Image (cartoon, rainbow, N blue to C red):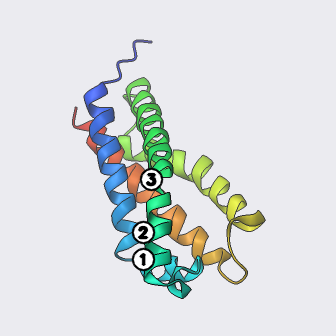
């Protein structure tokens, strides 16, 4: 089996995934996400301080997004007979959705917001995987 992972495709998919995540959690779901995490109860200076402290975590997120894009590119290359969107969807359905749900059910969401966090987080994951798979398929 000859597997060729195009690193430019991985880089482009990483950018797309990161951009989708930033948009997702700021624009359509920013208010509810802020409410779930109590950001709406913080002063502007406290919010600014928290945002500045997130810098290193954005670096970690970028690193794991590169890994995700690389693995997805590997799967797409390894299974050329399978449509790219099917690979992305089944990766999401079989691995991302169950892991996300478990994380939210067992400690990742404040009382009363478990379903909200599962829907928002897993929805973003589905969209970014499908978009990344499409980008990878272009290379």
Q: Residue at x 60, y 57 (%)?
A: 97
Q: Residue at x 55, y 87 (%)?
A: 41
How many circles with numbers are drawn on the protein?
Answer: 3
Q: CA distance from mark 1 to mark 3?
A: 18 Å
Residue at disc 3, secondary structure: helix
Crowding around mark 3 (Cα neighbors within 10 Å: few <14, some 14 to 19, many 20+) is: few
Q: Earlier in the sequence, mark 2 or mark 1?
A: 2
Q: Earlier in the sequence, mark 2 or mark 3?
A: 2
Q: CA distance from mark 2 to mark 1?
A: 5 Å
In the picture, measured across the screen, residue 137 lies left or right of residue 71, that is left
Q: Residue at x 53, y 45 (%)?
A: 91
- Badge nearest the viewer, 1 or 3: 3
Q: CA distance from mark 2 to mark 3?
A: 16 Å
Assign the N terminus to one quadrant of the image. Answer: top left
- The residue labelled by disc 1 is 30
- Badge nearest the viewer, 2 or 3: 3
Compared with residue 66, is residue 26 higher up or lower down, i.e. above or below?
A: below
- The residue labelled by disc 2 is 25
Quarter of the image for residue 78 reads: top left
Mark 2 touches mark 1? (CB < 8 Å): yes
Q: Residue at x 32, y 42 (%)?
A: 13
Compared with residue 22, is residue 111 higher up or lower down, i.e. above or below?
A: below
Picture disc at residue 108: none
Compare residues 2 and 37 and report the one nearer the observer.
37
Residue at disc 2, secondary structure: helix
- The residue labelled by disc 3 is 55
């Amino acid at each position: 089996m000859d597997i060729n992972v195009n690193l430019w495709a991985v880089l482009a998919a990483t950018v797309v995934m990161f951009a989708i995540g930033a948009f997702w959690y700021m624009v359509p779901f920013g208010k509810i996400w802020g409410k779930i995490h109590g950001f709406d109860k913080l002063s502007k200076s406290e919010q600014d301080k928290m945002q500045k402290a997130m810098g290193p975590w954005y670096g970690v997120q970028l690193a794991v997004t590169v890994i995700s894009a690389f693995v997805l590119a590997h799967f797409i290359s390894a299974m050329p007979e399978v449509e790219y969107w099917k690979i992305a969807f089944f990766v999401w359905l079989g691995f991302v959705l169950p892991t996300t749900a478990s994380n939210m059910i067992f400690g990742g969401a404040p009382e009363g917001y478990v379903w909200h966090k599962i829907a928002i987080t897993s929805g973003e994951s589905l969209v970014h995987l499908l978009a990344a798979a499409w980008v990878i398929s272009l290379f």
